[in-house]
Amino acid sequence: MTDHPSDLTEGMTGTGVTVAVDGDRIQRASNRFNEQLRVARLAGEHVWVATVAHRVDDPTAAVAGQLHLDAESIVYAGVGCFICETPYEPRMLTRRCKGEPR
């Protein structure tokens, strides 16, 4: 991960198709998400996100932009609220988000 989205030049691959993910695209997505977070916090709404973790055998490849992520490397996948970090459960759909965890 980098602190500067414009430094990213990696791509994402899925079903044999490589999609370039450049810094500008990451920055636009980040700006949209930050605005969605701002609105959700004001309204007390959850912001549900899917998190997928992949095993990385060679961290130097990730830094060099040669990271290959596919279904075989997935070690975890889950859905939870980005704001309060509560795992998704159907009953959570009717509850307000309590905000940042303490």
Image (cartoon, grey):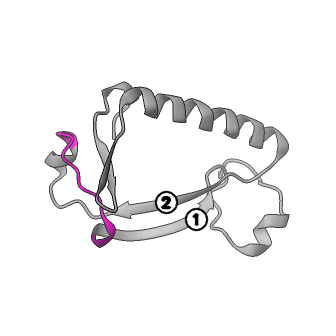
The disc placed on residue 51 is 2
Q: Residue at x 38, y 29 (%)?
A: 23
The answer to whether any part of residue 24 appears in the image is: yes
Q: Secondary structure at mark 1?
A: strand
**Sequence-wise first label, 2 or 1:** 2
Q: Position of residue 31 (x, y in %)?
A: 57, 29
Q: Secondary structure at mark 2?
A: strand
Q: Residue at x 79, y 73 (%)?
A: 91
Q: Position of residue 78 (x, y in %)?
A: 52, 68
Mark 2 touches mark 1? (CB < 8 Å)? yes
What secondary structure is the magenta-colored segment mainly?
A: loop
Magenta-highlighted residues: 63-72
Q: Residue at x 67, y 47 (%)?
A: 100
- Could you tell me which quadrant the N terminus lies in? top left
User: Residue beneath label 1, please?
Assistant: 79
Seen in the picture, residue 15 relative to 102 is either above or below; the reply is: below
Mark 2, Cα crowd under 10 Å, few <14 / some 14-19 / many 20+, is few
- For the residue marked with disc 2, what is the amino acid? Thr
Q: In which image quadrant can residue 70 be found?
A: bottom left
Q: Nearer the viewer, residue 19 or 33?
A: 19
Seen in the picture, residue 21 relative to 69 is either above or below; the reply is: above
Q: In which image quadrant can residue 22 be found?
A: top left
Q: Position of residue 8 (x, y in %)?
A: 31, 33
- For the residue marked with disc 1, what is the amino acid? Val
Seen in the picture, residue 23 relative to 10 is either above or below; the reply is: above
